[in-house]
Image (cartoon, helix red, strand yellow):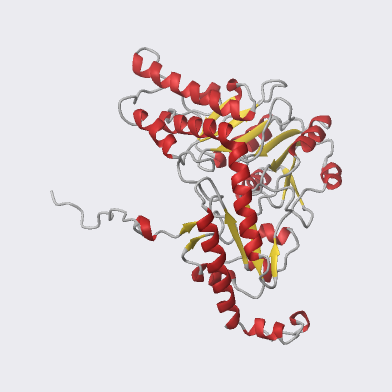
Amino acid sequence: MNAPKDLPKQPVPMFSPKHFPVYMDYSATTPIDPVVVDKMLPYLREQFGNAASRSHAYGWAAEEAVEWARSEVALLVHADPREIVFTSGATESINLALKGAAHFYKDRGNHIITVKTEHKATLDTCRELEREGFEVTYLDVLPNGLIDFAQLEAAMKPGTILASVMYVNNEIGVVQDIPAIGELCRSRGVIFHVDAAQATGKVEIDLEKTKVDLMSFSAHKTYGPKGIGALFVRRKPRIRIEAQIHGGGHERGMRSGTLAVHQIVGMGEAFRIARIDMASENKRIRALRDRLLNGLKDIEEVYVNGDMDNRVPHNLNISFNYVEGESMLMALKDLAISSGSACTSASLEPSYVLRALGRNDELAHSSIRFTLGRFTTEEEVDFTIKLVKEKIAKLRELSPLWEMYKDGIDLSTIQWAAH
């Protein structure tokens, strides 16, 4: 039998390690910590058992590893391990939380509240629920990216069953006041879901005190493997959700499917490291982020997007006026950065998050997200500052709009001819 002629080619790395661009895109994904890799390897080799196999040592060892990881995830966020449900990632967790709660509590009402700056995993899930007949209110944010509490409270009505707010915005790094929002939701009898994919290891999360009912997590944003996440489902007061994946009743009936033990162990180890190192790591990364900001803020016509006080230390989102975003990314090919979210940066549309802040199309299009992390060095930050300054200056030299601006022409008054 002849082999097919169109066999897929083996993947080839794009760069040799020494020619990789400087990585400044930690909000897109984080490299797996080598300690996490070492923890996972036995469960890819000799410890290959199925955690649902209760009749022999392979299954017992796998189950023990899963429960250890469940406890580590719970410890980071001050939850009961029984409240942690493993999923394939934050997107699945968000779908399970929103669809699962909406379907279970639909007899109480059909109104859901979320925010215009949420991740697409939340926005697209809400749009799907709208197609099912649910009503969704999408809240505006203030120019600094924070929620207007008065608007949130005004949006609540007798039929409101669910609210969903992200803890840390993936594009601008703004941290919402989740404890205060939780108090409001609990007082109004509204189930509260939080997308915490960008928060773990960056923000102190205490689910014993904070009135959050459902919270979504991702491993690969916290130096763990891709393809694994978790959903916190509160036990007291008990929150019920309808399963979205059926077939075996795993994870207490909320998420069927054979557990990926090696990935779960990786998530547990990543969250264990985050719990131990968060304070010192945040301090170091904040110093690097501030060094980057101080190196770039003297460039003419630059704008920081999002509140700088209520923000994780890892994020710096800047718009460079009179420079086109895609041209900037091409010019800065020696930096691994993004324009907007990694999930939407393939689109040529301006960032919907920055538009929600009130930025015009030009500033939204000219934004760059720099996100730093565990392995970022001072030398990499200094290299980034030098390169960005050089390339922005060169791109503006080629821009007729920049020339007009320097000549004192108010570009907002120009009537551009349509073609």
Position in image of residue 48 (x %, y %): 34, 26
Q: Using the rendered view, name the quadrant where residue 239 is placed.
A: top right
Position in image of residue 278 (x %, y %): 60, 37
Residue 315, placed above or below residue 52: below
Residue drawn at the location 86% of the way across and 44% of the way down: 154
Residue sitting nearer the eye, 381 or 391: 381
Residue drawn at the location 34% of the way across and 24% of the way down: 47
Q: Quadrant of the C terminus?
A: bottom right
Position in image of residue 320 (x %, y %): 65, 69
Q: Using the rendered view, name the quadrant where residue 404 is placed.
A: bottom right
Residue drawn at the location 63% of the way across and 43% of the way down: 283
Position in image of residue 353 (x %, y %): 68, 57
Residue sitting nearer the eye, 59 or 291: 291
Residue drawn at the location 57% of the way across and 31% of the way down: 276
Tally the numbered discs. Answer: 0
Residue 245, placed above or below residue 63: below
- With 219 as the anchor, is 1 left or right in this view? left
Residue sitting nearer the eye, 59 or 255: 59
Q: Is residue 227 visible?
A: yes
